[in-house]
Amino acid sequence: MLTATEDSIRSLSEKNSENIINSLDSAKILLEQLYESGEGQFSREEILDDLMKLVEISERIKSTGNLGEKIEIFFGEYQTLSNQLKTKYNDFLPSRVVKKLETEEKYMEGFKRLLIAQEYMLQAFDDKYLVDQAGKLYTGMVKLSEVLEQYIFFSPDWLIEIVKKIPLAILSDPTLQPEQPGISQEVVNYLTALKNTSRGVLWQIYNYKKEKKHTVGELLNWLEIAPSWAGNDFEECLEYVNRTRK
C-alpha cells in the first residue's frame, strides 16, 4: 500500500483534538456571558464555580497529548457536567445555544466512532498478508460509511474533507485495485467490496454537500457564540457570512 493511503487515514485524528477544546470553549463562553450579565436566579459565585469546573476539565484535556485520554475525559467528565449545566441553566440559555451544544456532543460521538473505523484501517498496515490488509481496510470503510450515515449532519466541513481524502486515496492506490494480476479470489472480493464502498462514501459526501447550504440566520447564530470569532463590525461579519455560504 502507498504511504499516501496511510497518511490520509492517519490525518483523521490529527486536527480533531483541537475541536474537543472548541466544544469546551463554547460552553465556557456561555457561562462567561451569563456571569457578566448578572441575570437570572444564580449568584455570580455559583456561576463562577461551574465555570471553574469547565476550566479544570479543559486544562486537563489540553495538558495530555494522548487523543484517547482526551476523549475519555470528554465523555467521562465533560459530557456529564454539560448535561447538568444544560438542565440547570436551561431557562436562561437561548434554544439555539442549547442546540449548538447538543450538536457538538453529537459531533464528538461521531468522531469517537470514526476513530474506531480508523483503527481497523491502520491495523491493515501491520499485516503482511494482502487478504488481511484488504479485509481490515474494507471493514474500516464500512464503519466509516455507517458513521457518515448517522453523524454527517453534525460534522464540520473540514472534517468531511479529511474523510473524503481516505476513499480517494484508496481508489487511486494501484496496490489496492482488484484488477491487478496474481492475487487470490478472496483478495479480489475484498478489494472489489472496498472499491465499491469507497465510491459509496464519496457518493454520501457528494449528496450531503448538494443538500446542505447554511442560511444567513444559522451562520449569524454560529458567529455569535463561536469561540474563534473575534470580529465585531457588522459589515465585516456580513462579508464573512456571504463568503462562507459560497
Image: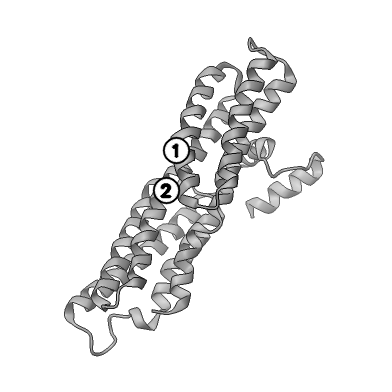
Q: Secondary structure at mark 2?
A: helix
**What's the amino acid at mark 1?**
Phe
Residue 156 higher or lower than 59, as above or below: below
Residue 92, given in percent of the width and then of the height, sits at: 61, 18
Evaluate whether residue 154 shows in this view: no
Q: Which residue bears the numbered disc 2?
A: 112
**What's the amino acid at mark 2?**
Lys
Front residue of this view, candidates 182 and 130: 130
Q: CA distance from mark 2 to mark 1?
A: 10 Å
What residue is shown at x 43% (from left), y 79% (from top)? Answer: 2
Residue 233, given in percent of the width and then of the height, sits at: 82, 40
What residue is shown at x 34% (from left), y 66% (from top)? Answer: 123
Quadrant for the C terminus in the image: bottom right
Q: Secondary structure at mark 1?
A: helix
Q: Which label lies toward us, 2 or 1? A: 1
What residue is shown at x 44% (from left), y 38% (from top)? Answer: 75
Residue 205, given in percent of the width and then of the height, sits at: 44, 58
Which residue, as the protein is rendered here, is positioned at the far bottom? 181
Which residue, as the protein is rendered here, is positioned at the far top? 41
What residue is shown at x 59% (from left), y 31% (from top)? Answer: 54
Determine which quarter of the picture holds residue 179.
bottom left
Determine which quarter of the picture holds residue 220.
top right
Q: Which residue bears the numbered disc 1?
A: 75
Residue 54 higher or lower than 236, as above or below: above
Evaluate whether residue 194 shows in this view: yes
Q: Earlier in the sequence, mark 2 or mark 1?
A: 1
Check whether the beta carbons of the residues at disc 2 and disc 1 lie within 8 A of each other: yes
Determine which quarter of the picture holds residue 101.
top right
Tally of numbered discs: 2
